[in-house]
Image: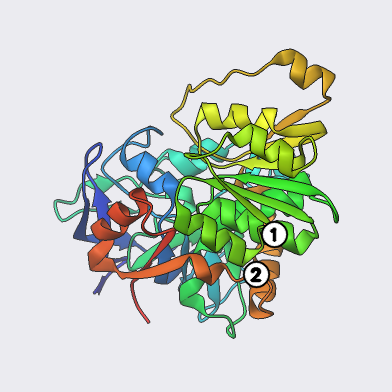
Amino acid sequence: MTTGNSMTIRAAVTREKGGAFQLEDVTLRAPREDEVLVRIVATGMCHTDLIVRDQLYPVPLPAVLGHEGAGVIEAVGPAVHSLKVGDHVVLSYAHCGDCTPCDAGHASYCNEFFARNFSGAGPDGEQAIRDDNDQPVRDHFFGQSSFATYALSRENNAIRVSKDAPLERLGPLGCGIQTGAGAVINTLRVAPGSRFCAFGAGAVGLSAVMAARIAGATTIIAVDMIESRLDLALELGATHVINAGKESVVERVREIAGGGVNFALESTGRPEVLRQGIDALGGLGVLGVVGAPALGTEAAFDVNDLLLGGKSIRGIVEGDSVARRFIPQLVELHLQGRFPFDRLVKFYDFADIEQAARDSEAGVTLKPVLRLSS
């Protein structure tokens, strides 16, 4: 229902630390300036949604989370020029578009990244969502808050995609899938004939495995403790798998890779796994770090091993991707059958969001995707 400059939508509201995603009727204001109103067809559930629910990242509550939305533009603000009503879009991370990193093509390191994605408010400090008591609900999560039937996004983080692509599958490209694939292709620049290891075979790690195959790595190792994930890794391009609960990970990686890998990616957020990643590198190897632990988490490593081996550790946000270019590239690779990220997806009705969260935490589902409309 639309009333004046606002409309009633259905949203999953997180009201307390560790609390349930409660489906509520809330109001959402109309788009302003460079904003677009998107009818959400489907949205992925990401590890980051769960750690914010649990307040490992202190986004103020109550809030509407969700940051892997895909949908159809229903309205545009007066300053929008590149998008129009009816466009299919994938929603990605928020960035200012004007700072030095943004100007240099590194928007995922925007000077305002944390404020725009995790503050629970828009750039002007206000909320666009209000509950049935007319109280503001924290929103603008990753510039979208897509655990809702409709979401507001800015023009620069709503990425137009081909209408030939299966829109309900595409939301995870906006964060998790983009992160794993982008880390391999954009940041690490995994080379043909190289040796690569993914520490963690969740959605991000398996996206990295698929990207490493596309990049031409000839030794691709996946490490995890869940056998079904390791089996899938082999189907998606891994040449070797290691069950971390049954084998000595570093020793086995170095054995497989003839002394160590050229490139590795740590996606678990666990400091002890990060240490394994560093130790498993060969000379001049590079470890990318994308796993997100609680703020303030510290890790240890052997400084002389790093120094004498010429090793590097690189933090990576959103796969260092320029989403407007990279997401359509991933869509095209998917349509060609070369990037089958749909193998990671399991669909849930919006009403089953709590089950999706439980299945994700239990490792039963790699990438839950909530269906909201057709």
Residue beneath the point at 42% across and 64% down: 43
Q: Quadrant of the C terminus?
A: bottom left
Front-most of 209 and 67?
209
- Do callouts 2 and 1 mark residues in contact (Cβ within 8 Å)? yes
Q: Position of residue 347 (x, y in %)?
A: 37, 70
- Looking at the image, residue 227 sits to the left or right of residue 64; the answer is right
Badge 2: residue crowd in 10 Å (few <14, some 14–19, many ≥20):
many
Q: Position of residue 371 (x, y in %)?
A: 35, 72
Front-most of 159 and 51?
51
**Who comes first in sequence, dot 2 or dot 1?**
1
The three-letter code of the residue at mark 1 reads Ala
Q: What secondary structure is marked by label 1?
A: helix
* Residue 339: numbered disc: 2
Distance between mark 2 and mark 1 Cα atoms: 8 Å
Residue beneath the point at 55% across and 78% down: 87
Residue beneath the point at 58% across and 34% down: 248
Q: Position of residue 128 (x, y in %)?
A: 35, 53
Q: Position of residue 350 (x, y in %)?
A: 28, 67
* Residue 236: numbered disc: none
Residue beneath the point at 80% across and 18% down: 307
Front-most of 240 and 65?
240
Q: Name the residue that disc number 1 marks.
A: 211
Q: How are the colours assigned in the image?
A: rainbow
Task: Answer with the quarter of the image where residue 42 lies.
Answer: bottom left
In this rendering, does residue 154 appear at all? no
